[in-house]
Image: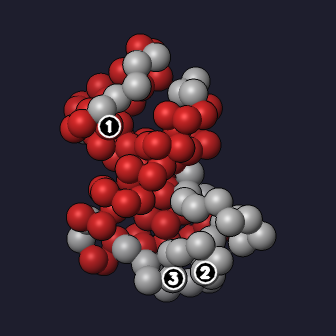
């Protein structure tokens, strides 16, 4: 991970501050990048479907909230980061990194029985 992404994650985990503006988007992106790379390590996450990058991105988008919670980010902030990534950051990424099947109830939904998205 690039140093700036690591700084965003460290600030998120250790300061207890609620990021806003660009820092909010940087923090959401930093957590998503970490989860994206972790997805590449999870064989089950990427097996059986075409488009490993798009699947990893979808998996990562759905892991921003729980990953942020794991490093001590309060629930409301973690939800906000997940929404920021899904609604503001992810749409700006290159098209090959997005999966059209990445949606609530879609085949890449890791919680298909829940209405929680991402």
**Mark 2 in CB contact with mark 1 (< 8 angstroms):** no
Q: In the rendering, which numbered label is found on residue 101?
A: 3
**Mark 3 in CB contact with mark 2 (< 8 angstroms):** yes
Residue receiving disc 2: 106
Q: Residue at x 22, y 38 (%)?
A: 22
Binning the other alpha carbons within 10 Å of mark 3 as few (below 14), some (14 to 19) or many (20 upward) gives: some
Precedes in sequence: disc 2 or disc 1: 1
Precedes in sequence: disc 1 or disc 3: 1
Residue receiving disc 1: 24
Residue placed most toward the observer, 56 or 109:
109
SS class of the residue under badge 2? loop
Q: Quadrant of the N terminus?
A: top left
Q: CA distance from mark 1 to mark 3?
A: 26 Å
Q: Quadrant of residue 112?
A: bottom right
Q: CA distance from mark 3 to mark 2?
A: 6 Å
Q: For the view shown, which residue lies furthest in the right direction? A: 113
Q: Residue at x 38, y 50 (%)?
A: 84
Residue 96: x and y in percent read: 30, 77
- Viewed as shown, does residue 23 lie left or right of 76? left
User: In the displayed structure, would residue 49 be above or below residue 86?
Assistant: below
Q: How is the image coloured?
A: secondary structure
- Viewed as shown, does residue 43 lie left or right of 81? right
Residue 102: x and y in percent read: 51, 75
Q: CA distance from mark 2 to mark 1?
A: 27 Å
């Amino acid at each position: 991970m690039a140093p700036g992404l690591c700084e965003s994650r460290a600030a998120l985990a250790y300061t207890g501050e609620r990021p806003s503006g660009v820092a909010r988007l940087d923090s959401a992106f930093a957590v998503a990048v970490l989860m994206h790379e972790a997805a590449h390590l999870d064989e089950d996450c990427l097996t059986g479907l075409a488009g490993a990058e798009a699947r990893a991105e979808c998996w990562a988008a759905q892991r921003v909230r729980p990953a942020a919670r794991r490093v001590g980010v309060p629930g409301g902030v973690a939800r906000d980061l997940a929404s920021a990534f899904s609604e503001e950051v992810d749409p700006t990424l290159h098209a090959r990194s997005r999966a059209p099947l990445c949606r609530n109830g879609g085949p890449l939904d890791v919680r298909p029985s829940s209405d929680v998205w991402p």
